[in-house]
Amino acid sequence: MSIDSRPTPRRRLPLLAIVPLALFLGLAGVFLIMLLSGRDASVVPSALIGAPAPQTSLPPLEGSPLPGIESASFGGELTLVNVWASWCAPCRQEHPLLMDLAEDEGLTIAGLNYKDRPEQARNFLAELGNPYDAIGVDGSGRTAIDWGVYGVPETFLVGADGTILYKHVGPFTPQSMRDGLMVAIERARSGG
């Protein structure tokens, strides 16, 4: 009997086992960097900031004396476009802040009523008050898509020149209104 004197070859990890491990470690590194960056995860960037507001033509809320929303109405004045619905609990939460904001004479507030029933929208406003100068009904949700809406509520500040200056995703809180929206409004008013 002869014994083979050659050394036994070492088993190497197959390349197919290394590639998934490398991908996992790479992704874990990216996620760790994002977590430690200090960036506010609630801020959703919008490609529309600095761009003209989308062409919008929405009919008025049935049974309301207010006009619908037309893009032409954005020209010449600072306009807040608030996307809301009666079935939206966070919309109810932010509504008192919009009511306070409605007292600002230099700001027009337009409500984009999203996929709502007219009677429910009217009941919502009758119960909580109406901060809007115009209400356009987006029954199909198509206009909200044009505006880049992720969900309700969302709010856009449109400058006097028709350019989107600011976007807020989710319901306003006193802090987000003070630190975000009011800063954007003051910047727009001062021409900066």
Image (cartoon, helix red, strand yellow):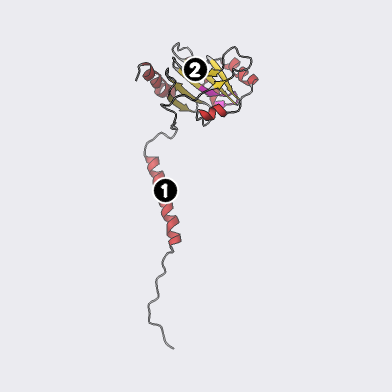
Please indicate whether residue 71 sits to the left or right of residue 86 in the image: left
Q: Secondary structure at mark 1?
A: helix
Report which quarter residue 69 is drawn in. Answer: top right
What residue appears at the point 61 percent right and 20 percent down from the top-left corner? 121
Q: State whether residue 26 is above or below residue 102.
A: below
What residue appears at the point 36 percent right and 20 percent down from the top-left corner? 187
Q: Is residue 85 magenta?
A: yes
Where is residue 167 shown, x and y percent of the image? 45, 26
Check residue 28 in the rendering and tell me which mark sits there, or answer none. Answer: 1
Q: Give the amino acid at mark 2.
A: Ala
The magenta stretch spans which residues?
82-89
| Sequence-first disc among 2 and 1 | 1
Residue 118 in sight in this render: yes
Residue 174 in sight in this render: no
What residue appears at the point 64 percent right and 23 percent down from the top-left corner? 117
Check residue 3 in the rendering and tell me which mark sits there, or answer none. Answer: none
Q: State whether residue 37 is above or below residue 69.
A: below
Q: Is residue 164 magenta?
A: no
Mark whose residue sits in front, 2 or 1? 2
Quarter of the picture holding the C terminus:
top left
Check residue 72 in the rendering and tell me which mark sits there, or answer none. Answer: 2
Report which quarter residue 14 is drawn in. Answer: bottom left
Q: Give the amino acid at mark 1.
A: Ala
